[in-house]
Amino acid sequence: MILFLSGVEVRLEPHAVHITNDAALQRLLNRQAEPATEKLVQEIISAYQQHYRQPFAINPDSLAVEIWGHVYVEQFAEYMERLIQSKLIEKILSPVKGICSVIDCGESGHDQNRWFWDLLAPFKSTIAGWLPVKQYPL
């Protein structure tokens, strides 16, 4: 099932959600990334619960950190490509960007990387402090 939550495309399937990492997600995160992400995460958890009639067994902080990890790693890869402008760098970073284009978030036992995001989840507030902040003129 494909939904648009906070303007972001999210595909639900049993034990997993797939979040499209595109301009819509980046626009959302450009506005106060932490509260915008928390709202998106709650919408995802609620939509999953409503659709499958069971809770989505992922810690909300783990899901938030996973979203940030994919979005900002992809942005860094794109920045490095523009900065260095080398075919070799493009070739090295292309798979990274491909992996980050859709954020696959699965429950334990259905996502081989869940342990990593769960490990980072207790540091969500600290990680949020490292996120880039967009400055808009008043």
Image (cartoon, rainbow, N blue to C red):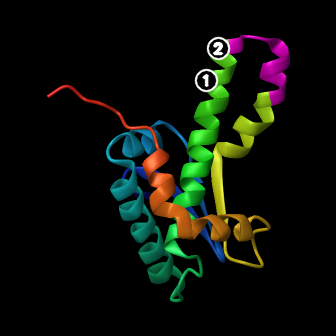
Q: Residue 67 is drawn in which quadrant?
A: bottom right
Q: Which mark is residue 79?
A: 1
Mark 2 and mark 1: span between their CA atoms?
A: 6 Å
**Please, what is the dominant secondary structure of the magenta stretch?**
helix
Q: Secondary structure at mark 2?
A: helix
Q: Inspect the image, locate mark 1, and give the three-letter code of the amino acid beneath it.
A: Tyr
Q: Would residue 56 be visible to someone looking at this image?
A: yes
In percent of the image, x 80 and y 67: which residue is there? 112
For residue 135, side relative to residue 21 (left or right): left
Are circles 2 and 1 on residues that touch, CB within 8 Å? yes
Front residue (pair 117, 48)? 117
Tell me: residue 124, above or below residue 22.
Answer: below
In percent of the image, x 45 and y 65: which residue is there? 41
Q: Where the C terminus falls, by quadrant?
A: top left
* Label tally: 2
Q: Inspect the image, locate mark 2, and give the three-letter code of the amino acid beneath it.
A: Leu
In percent of the image, x 73 and y 71: which residue is there? 115
Furthest residue in direction bottom, as rendered? 54
Residue 136 is situated, as x and y percent measured from the top left of the image, at 25, 29
Looking at the rendering, the stretch of residues picked out in magenta corresponds to 84-92
Residue 38 is situated, as x and y percent measured from the top left of the image, at 39, 63
Front residue (pair 42, 11)? 42
Q: Would residue 1 be visible to someone looking at this image?
A: no
| Residue on which the image places disc 2 | 83
In percent of the image, x 65 and y 77: which residue is there? 14
